[in-house]
Every structure is written in structure tokens, then in C-alpha cells.
């Protein structure tokens, strides 16, 4: 049996201090929808930063190394990652089914292949610092940018929602609504943005599954892979 790690550690036993990691914050008695909305607003703002091409940062000057379109890369990334995934985590049939699923949905990314916005690529409650103020919640910082790149910001929303079933009720709804409402004016939100974000998240899920045996988050990613293979790509909720 694989361990199930809750990315959100629900803490109601200690007093409040400013600048807490979101995953460890005391949230009882607050509007979690408002908290989610504040986080969604800030995450949407990350995508307001424009770059000259899609790809990954090559140096400390944030030069972007050009990449082939994501729609072309997803099938081969999935295949490479599944070949490196421990058999004890995902059996052969599931790994092949995941490659097939990625291949089937990769063409959808053509519509956002040319996006050249800043993407954090590791948006989750452990990487966000928040403070509760008299007027509500404030995001103080977004941490850990080592995976950031130039691409489509919808992936950040999917990243936050990846393990959303473990989040307190109301947070993800607030996040999703605010993320959509605060998209940059020069990047109109497409109707299927949530679906496209999920397809982008297939890169991360594929990579996570390759981690060594006993890696708890990798095991949780494998649970998601099994679910998607069986039920299809879920809505962003």
C-alpha cells in the first residue's frame, strides 16, 4: 500500500504569526474562499510577466533556451518517464495507458504552444507565505522558483489543483475563480483553460512518477495517473 501524503497540513493548534507557509497556517474561523482568491490573484499575476520565447531559463540572467512546442514534446516525455518509472509504482499496462493518454491529448496544447509567460511550475501551499491582516489575507511571497520557465500560465493553476482533494473546503473554488478573473488583460482567457492546464500538468505527473521507490509525493502522483487513466482528465476542481 502506498503512503498518502497530505500536501496541506491542517493546523489549528497554535497562534498566528505573520508570513507563515500556507500549508502550515492556522485557518479555522476564516473565509477559505477569500484566502483562495488572494492566492489565485497573485498566481494569475505571475503570468503577467512576458518573455521573448517559450522554454527554460538558461542562466542567471533569465535568458530563455528555445524549446520545441510542448504539444510535440508531451508524448515523448511521457514515454521516457514511464520507462524510468519503478514497476512497483505503476505496472506496465498503466504506464502504457498513460503514454497513450498523453499522446491523445497532446495536440490540444497547440493552441497555447506560443504562450511566453512566466510560469512558476511548482505552485502549491508549501511554496506560498501568507499573512492574515485586519482586512483579510495577504500573500507575502511565492517561494522556490527553480522549476520556473516561459510558457502557458494555465499550468500553474493545474499545479495548485493537482492534489486539491486534500485542501480545506472552499479554498480551491476561491483560487480558481480569482485566477480566471485576474488574468492579464493582454492574454484573454480561453474557454478550455482549465483542461489545457491539466494537460500541461501531465508533464509534471510523468516526471514525478520516476522518483525512487518510497518517494511519497511520487506515489501520490502515481495515484493520480491511475485515476486519469481510468476516469479521464478531471475538471480543475
Image: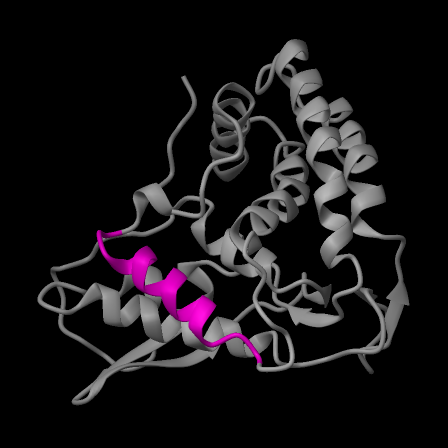
Lateral position of residue 92 relative to residue 144, left or right: right
Figure quadrant of residue 121? bottom right
Confirm whether residue 20 shows in the render.
no
Q: What predominant SS class does the magenta segment belong to?
A: helix
Q: How many marks?
A: 0
Find the magenta span and give its range.
168-184
Could you say which is closer to the camera, residue 28 or residue 109? 109
Lateral position of residue 206 relative to residue 122, left or right: right
Please provide percent x and percent y for residue 54.
Answer: 81, 65
Please provide percent x and percent y for residue 153.
Answer: 61, 64
Could you say which is closer to the camera, residue 187 or residue 117? 187
Question: Residue at 50% of width from left, 58% of height from top?
Answer: 157
Lateral position of residue 201 relative to residue 180, left or right: right
Please provide percent x and percent y for residue 216.
Answer: 47, 35
Q: From the viewer's perspective, is residue 76 above or below residue 182?
A: above
Lateral position of residue 112 relative to residue 20, left or right: right
Q: Residue furthest bottom?
A: 134
Quick check: is 113 in the magenta stretch?
A: no
Please provide percent x and percent y for residue 87.
Answer: 65, 15
Question: Residue at 62% of width from left, 32% of height from top?
Answer: 209
In the picture, which quadrant includes the N terminus?
A: top left
Question: Residue at 34% of width from left, 66% of height from top?
Answer: 22
Question: Residue at 37% of width from left, 32% of height from top?
Answer: 4
Amino acid at each position: 500500500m502506498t503512503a498518502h501524503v497530505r500536501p496541506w497540513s491542517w493546523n489549528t493548534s497554535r497562534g498566528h504569526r505573520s508570513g507563515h507557509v500556507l500549508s502550515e497556517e492556522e485557518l479555522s474561523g476564516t473565509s477559505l474562499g477569500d484566502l483562495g482568491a488572494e492566492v489565485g490573484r497573485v498566481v494569475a499575476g505571475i503570468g503577467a510577466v512576458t518573455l521573448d520565447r517559450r522554454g527554460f531559463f538558461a542562466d542567471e540572467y533569465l535568458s530563455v533556451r528555445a524549446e520545441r512546442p510542448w504539444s510535440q514534446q508531451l508524448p515523448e516525455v511521457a514515454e521516457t518517464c514511464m520507462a524510468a518509472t519503478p514497476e512497483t509504482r505503476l505496472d506496465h499496462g498503466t504506464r502504457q495507458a498513460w503514454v497513450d493518454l498523453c499522446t491523445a491529448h497532446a495536440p490540444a496544447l497547440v493552441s497555447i504552444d506560443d504562450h511566453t509567460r512566466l510560469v512558476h511550475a511548482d505552485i502549491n501551499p508549501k511554496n506560498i507565505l501568507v499573512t492574515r491582516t485586519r482586512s483579510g489575507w495577504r500573500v507575502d511571497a511565492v517561494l522556490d522558483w527553480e522549476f520556473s520557465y516561459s510558457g502557458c500560465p494555465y499550468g500553474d493553476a493545474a499545479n495548485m489543483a493537482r492534489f486539491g482533494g486534500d485542501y480545506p473546503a472552499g479554498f480551491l473554488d476561491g483560487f480558481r475563480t480569482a485566477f480566471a478573473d485576474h488574468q492579464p488583460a493582454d492574454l484573454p482567457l480561453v474557454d478550455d483553460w482549465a483542461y489545457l492546464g491539466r494537460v500541461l500538468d501531465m508533464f509534471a505527473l510523468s516526471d514525478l512518477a520516476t522518483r525512487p521507490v518510497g518517494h511519497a509525493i511520487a506515489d501520490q502522483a502515481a495515484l493520480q495517473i491511475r485515476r486519469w487513466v481510468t476516469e479521464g482528465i478531471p475538471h480543475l476542481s
